[in-house]
Image: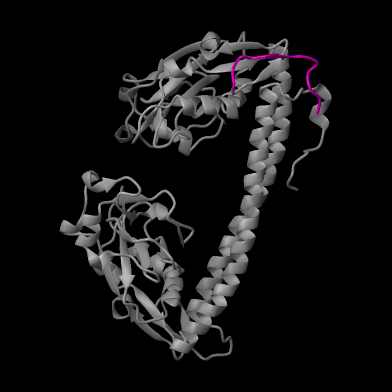
Amino acid sequence: MKKYNSYKDSGVEWIGEIPNHWKLIRLNVLGEFSKGKGITKEKIKEEGFPCIRNGEIYTTYNRITNNIFSFIDEETTNESITVEKGTFLFTGDGETVEEIGKCLVYNGDESLYVGGGINIFKPRLDKVNHIYMSYVLNSESVVYQKSRDGRGEIVVHIYSKQLKEIKLGLPPLSEQQQIVSFLDNKTQKIDSLIQQKEKKIELLKEKRTSLINHVVTKGLDSNVEMKDSGLEWIGEIPNGWIKTKLKYVTNIYGRIGYRGYTVEDIVDEGEGVITISPSNINNDVFSTKNSTYITWDKYYESPEIQIFTNDIILVKTGSTIGKTSIIPEDVPEMTINPQLVVLKDVKLFPKYLYYQTTCRFIKESFLIEQTGSSTPTISQLKVNEFPLLQPSLLEQQQIVEYLDKQTEEIDTLIQLEQKKIDTLKEYRQSLISEVVTGKIKVCKEDNSLSLNSPIV
């Protein structure tokens, strides 16, 4: 791709040089800022007037959105304000700097009601193309400026007075449209590749789940005599297997009653011990990344829920109820938070029990026995009653060895596809940043070029 004939120093370190005919401007020159208000979670309805809340911007929507999935009643509209097509919505706060200042442009035809915590930017369309600005405001240099200006420790905030000071290079309107055509064409191709690989990952995950479900309910010998398990979602099981319950093969412990803790017990890394939460389990794999820490006093107060290698943890409360993992070797000292329970003193091969907890019949048990609508939960007593299948110790060992090998091969393929997705996303972001900062010149003929991606 070409570069522009001449450049000038922008005077801004994170922007660098810009094409000579571009203008360096502050965002406040290009439009007006305001603030959303008046919409809480409790006021959301299944139908009514379309609205959007702060958290939905970084959890639900992409860079541009035409569709809205939340609604409020007419009474609540009197407490809120509306925006029209072409308006930008910035998150005003979040738990991390990645969440603050994320923005989308509303491209729908209906008026949209905007909740509190959202910074609203109405651009002057005689100066900027709003789709072009959607690329710019999510580019690396602007994201850097937003994260640099974030304020707060526990909850990070960014305010319109900081957003107004965002600096960017601005080409003429005709060139903005040319850039939009180019980036729309290229990013659509990249996104199509990403979607193909995400679909492949989902198919691999389904294959992994199906494999485990089959082996831990039917065994490895396809010629073995079968019998009815008496459970609809299990069906027939090998004749020599025993149907039992969780409480007969392990002990279950949780953080209940006086063993709970408050925010006063939470400390910084290095000052306490990890307290495991559902976020430490991803696709049934345990990780200590992004951990929370509590005091050593709280850790020693409850030795029965101290976590060790081969312990099995289950999520019993929250939106991810039923998630499970086995604790690997060489982990630091840890405990659990009130959302989890831990299985100890396992009388089966621990890894075999873990594979069972990932199966459909355990997931079905969670769905049947859980209570609570907004925050699903299940008691330890009910978890104790979950059904289990118990083959001989030799069969358990053989099943574990077989599944370890097969799932490792599938996981390797998943990791490979995920790495390709990450590379494509990095390439996409880099391409956008190079174009909207003028490092690459977009020509009309560029739109017909094939995607020059590092991943095929």
x and y, in percent, of residue 154 in the image: 33, 36
Q: Residue furthest front?
A: 270
x and y, in percent, of residue 136 in the image: 60, 23
Question: Does residue 230 show up?
Answer: no
In front of the other: 292 or 103 = 292
Above or below 227: residue 313: above
Colour option used: one colour
Q: On the image, which quarter does residue 277 sit in?
A: bottom left
* Residue beneath the point at 59% across and 66% down: 207
Above or below 346: residue 130: above
Q: On the image, which quarter does residue 288 sit in?
A: bottom left
* Residue beneath the point at 81% across and 16% down: 5
Q: Residue furthest left?
A: 258
Q: Which residues are magenta?
A: 1-13
Which quarter of the rendering shows the N terminus?
A: top right
Question: Does residue 176 show up?
Answer: yes
Answer with left or right where residue 253 lies relative to residue 58: left
Q: Confirm whether the magenta stretch covers residue 36.
A: no
Q: On the image, which quarter does residue 203 sit in?
A: bottom right
**Tag count in the figure?**
0
Q: Confirm whether the magenta stretch covers residue 7.
A: yes
* Residue beneath the point at 28% across and 61% down: 378
x and y, in percent, of residue 439 in the image: 72, 24
Above or below 197: residue 443: above
* Residue beneath the point at 20% across and 59% down: 256
In front of the other: 181 or 368 = 181
- Main secondary structure of the magenta stretch: loop
In front of the other: 122 or 154 = 154
